[in-house]
Structures are given as structure tokens and as C-alpha cells.
Image (cartoon, rainbow, N blue to C red):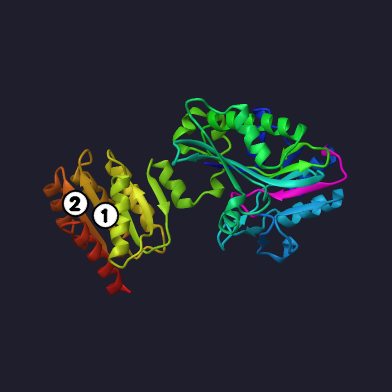
Amino acid sequence: MNLHEYQAKQVLANYGVPILGGGVAYTADEARAVAERLGGPVWVVKAQIHAGGRGKGHFLEEAAGGKGGVRVVKSLDDVQEAAFQMLGNTLVTHQSGPEGREVKRVYVEEGCDIARELYLSLLVDRATSGVTIMASTEGGMDIEEVAEKTPEKIIYQPISPETGMSAFHARAVAFALGLTGKQVSAFTRMALSLYECFVASDCAMLEINPLVVTGDGQILPLDCKMGLDPNALYRHPRLMDYRDESEEDPMELEASRHDLNYVKLDGTIGCMVNGAGLAMATMDIIKLKGGSPANFLDVGGGATRERVTAAFKIILSDPAVEGILVNIFGGIMRCDVIAEGVVAAARDVSLNVPLVVRLEGTNVELGKTILAESGLPIISADNLADAAEKVVKAVREAQ
């Protein structure tokens, strides 16, 4: 689950990380009121969407003023005008996709005297099975661009999960970033607080870009992205209140309500599979046979008929889907339950695309009988390769 910038900074502040004063606003008048409370003479008005690159982005509507989603302003009137131009309009960034995201709130923050811009993040590192600090002197840039063009400017500091983070880890990063004097101790205190926040909040990723050194030597997070592990959210009811469902893909949101693991992709063949490994293999073999998967969807090992029906409807709600492959290995999951769910959903939604079903395992013969006697145009497959070939062929013939 991703947080907005202002939400992430609220979480950081709870762990003692120093942040600039600011406030969220849902109207232009509210934005002006926040700026008045903060005092001047400089403010920054930031569009709040779940996508990076806001400052370099652009709005689709002319009414948005032709500027990006992060604006430095020097009067209360300009604060109000910037908020008015952003709110209700669509911001497109390199991470939002061409459709962009509607701005429903802005964050008004104090300005500061920036002497240097750095990059800092904490992430779960599969290579070390722990948390790794990643930093760079190239703050304000996309870290992917830095990694591609100047990888030597990226600093990695792994943290052992057995010992946790110590001051020497933070000092090593501080020295590598070229910090000196009191800046080193300020960075060390902040980095230790960030690590505490990361672990205690079950973060998957925490990125500060840029981390700035001010003219008077302070170390401050000017922007912050925070992603939380969705599997651990039950331990953080307060953080759950930060969830912004309007920023989530509607189909992925609906899937989460039925405890389905669904990720929308760019292809045309919808997939419904039980088990993440089998789902990955199914997508791979679809590509191998010349097709392209439209989604990853794992219904789980103990899905009910209702969950299977919901999964089928979610797949069909994607207008890009031109065919469906159901691939089920019945261990805990019974093939007859899958078959009943598929038949019920196909009847409810008036199936109008080719459907290929491959069943194997518990109650497989009963499942095949249910499909065969349904009266629906369901194509049966003997194995995974056969299923992939048949669905790719059916989609091509239907075009």
C-alpha cells in the first residue's frame, strides 16, 4: 500500500525525523489558509498523487497553467492560484502512465534554502535477505537514470536483520555522501530514525528524493515515498486509515476485496490460476506460444465458488481481454468448485470471448463433467501447453 507524501511525512515525524512545516488542502481556499498559518515568504505547492516525477510532469488540461505538479511560489495569491490550477485536473508523469492521475489534494509546505540535494532510500533487499540503505550524491534525479549512466555514484549499505542498524552504518553513508562536521551527526540521527520507522511500520520501500542539506547545515527530507507491505497491514490499523482507494486500479481494488491476488498487465489473454508459481508458469507459456497475458490472478488454494466467480468477473471487466485461460491444479482446491464458479460467472456476464479450461487433480472428472454439461462454449485442454496453444489460436481466430 502506497502513501501520499504528506502521509509519509506524518509517519516520519512520529519517529523523530525532522520535516518542514506543511499541511494538506482539498480546495484552493484551504491551501491559502495553510500558507497563512505557515508564514512566508516562500511556499511549495505539491500535487498529491501516487506517482513520482510530479515536478517534471504536465497537466492534460490547459486550465492547470501549463506547469508541473510541484510549484515554488512567493505570495498567498500564488499559493491559492497554484492549488486552484492543480485540483481536479489530471497530472501525467513518467510513472503515472499516459492517462495520468486526477489531483484531489495538494500539500502546501514551507520553502527552504537548498545547498545540496542527495538521494536516500531504504528497501527490502532480496540479495541480502535484509534491509539495504541506498544513497547517492545525485539527489533530485530518477535513481534508475543514475544507475544506468553513473552507477559508481550509488552507495549501498546492507543492514543485517540480526543486529539491526547501528550508528556506524549511518556514518559510513554520511561520509560517502561527502557530509562533514555537524551534518554527519544530524544525518546519523535521522538515518537511525528512518530505519526504526521502516522496520516498525513494515515498509517495503522508503525513498527520500531529494534529501537536502540546507544553507545552515540541516538535513531534511524534501520529498518522501513510502510503500507498506500489504501482508502486514493487519498489524497497523492506523496506517490502514491512510489508504487512498481512488489511487488504486479499480480491478485490483475489487480483487483485494475478495482476497484475490490480481495484477493487471498489458496483454489480451486473461488468466485465472491457483498458486503463484503456477500463475507465473502459465503467463510464461502463453508468451512462449505467441500470446500475451492480460493479468496475473491467483485465486489461492482454498477459494470458494463465490471467489472464483468474482475472479472471473474481474478478468472479464478488462476491455483488453480477448480470451481467457483457466488453469487449475486441484490439491486443496477442488476442480468441481472451480468448474461451478466458472460456469456461474460465465452465465452472469454473458461470456463473449473464447474460454479455455485446463483442470487437473482432485475431482477433475467431476469438474470436466460440470463444464461439458453447462451448455457453454468452453474449450477443454489436456495439459498446460495444450491450453496455451488453444487459447492463443482461439483469440487469433476471433480477431
Picture layout, residue 166 above or below residue 380? above
Q: Which residue is painted at 56% across and 33% down in the image? A: 198
Q: Amino acid at mark 1?
A: Val
Picture coordinates of residue 44, whole percent (x, y):
77, 48
Are discs 1 and 2 less than 8 Å apart at CB?
yes
- Label placed on residue 326: 1
Which of pointers 1 and 2 lies earlier in the amino acid sequence? Answer: 1
Q: Examine the residues drawn in magenta and state their main secondary structure.
A: loop
Q: Which residue is painted at 28% across and 49% down in the image? A: 278
User: Does the magenta-highlighted stretch encompass residue 45?
Assistant: yes
User: Does the magenta-highlighted stretch encompass residue 244?
Assistant: no
Q: Which residue is painted at 65% across and 64% down in the image? A: 60
In the depicted view, which residue is nearer to us: 175 or 281?
Answer: 175
Picture layout, residue 182 above or below residue 255? above
Picture coordinates of residue 16, whole percent (x, y):
68, 28
Q: Amino acid at mark 2?
A: Leu
The residues colored magenta run 38-53
- Label placed on residue 359: 2
Picture coordinates of residue 246, whole percent (x, y):
56, 48
Residue 112 shown left or right of residue 261 in the figure:
right
